[in-house]
Amino acid sequence: MMSFGDRFGYTRPEPQRTQVERDSDAVRLVLWNAVSRDGKSPLAAYRKLCEYSQQLPDANIWSDTYADESARLLLDQMIWLDVYEALEAEASAMEGPSRAELQKSVNRALSRSGIAYEMRDGRFEFYEPVANEFETRHDEDEAIASLTDEFEPVRKQYLSALRNLRSMPANLESAVADALNALEAVAKIVEAKPHATLGNVARNLFPDSPGYHAPLRIAIEKLYAYSNQLPGARHGRYAEPDIAHAETAMVVRTAGAIITFLITLHRGEAVAENAGADFDFGF
């Protein structure tokens, strides 16, 4: 059955999606409906919430009548992080229309609560509609996934950039600084020189190129120059930086994409895809 709003073409004004590290009554209601089979079984809800809260169920609670109050108390006591992890667990146990309906309910609750998360494919991610449109959302995830083995020490620094970008309020200068410092650290590792810079690596890229790669080398090198000139990023905050969240997200994601690219070349994983290309870094 269509809702009143759907029938008449009305939409409800939604608050700005700026809240993080919190949930809401609307989000908890979705969890309650999921664990209680839409309110039909408080006992099922109680047992599930005990599991998600890592508590032993009370042996004396064995019927819906006894379980209802205890289940609601458990739900009320859960911290926001447990709420989101519980919803992800519920989504992973569902498939088909049931999972789609849960995800729809979760995202509706998040939107109405002004919370800057969304559930996609059963997992929570930051709400970034522009990133979805331009398919750049997971550039940073690929960078994190590539920072293993000898690059593991860099992982913590790039994660710090993401935390600074996604915090409320965001620390934009620190996000830029951490992202570019992580990129510089990757350069030091691939060059096997503690004093190497991103420029050293960029100049060694595509040594046999006919010339059209030169602007790309310069662009990679200039990204580091950007961070040096941004007040408060890598040097003293001598002025108020004129930087927007979208600009910072672009810089952090670009740094992540270059990190993934450099590590891929360093490990020789791109050579097989283009046997005619020479990706020798010169070391």
Image: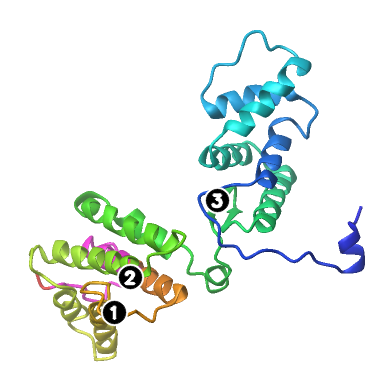
Q: Secondary structure at mark 1?
A: loop
Q: Image point 44% across, 60% down: which residue? A: 166
Q: Mark 1 = which residue?
A: 230
Point out the stretch of residues depicted in magenta. 257-281
Residue at the bottom extreme of this rendering: 211
Q: Is residue 219 left or right of residue 37?
A: left
Residue 222 seen in this snapshot: yes
Q: Quadrant of the C terminus?
A: bottom left
Q: Secondary structure at mark 3?
A: strand
Q: Nearer the viewer, mark 1 or mark 3?
A: 1
**Residue 197, above or below 83:** below
Q: Secondary structure at mark 2?
A: helix
Q: Earlier in the sequence, mark 1 or mark 3?
A: 3
Seen from the viewer's position, the closer of residues 117 and 190 is 117
Residue 209 drawn at (x, y percent): 23, 86
- Cβ–Cβ under 8 Å for marks 2 and 3: no
Q: Earlier in the sequence, mark 2 or mark 3?
A: 3
Q: Image point 23% across, 81% down: which residue? A: 225
Residues at marks 1 and 3, CA–CA distance in whole angstroms = 32 Å
Q: Mark 3 = which residue?
A: 124
Seen from the viewer's position, the closer of residues 121 and 75 is 75
Residue 74 drawn at (x, y percent): 62, 27
Q: Mark 2 = which residue?
A: 173
Residue 270 seen in this snapshot: no
Residues at marks 2 and 3, CA–CA distance in whole angstroms = 26 Å
Q: Earlier in the sequence, mark 2 or mark 1?
A: 2
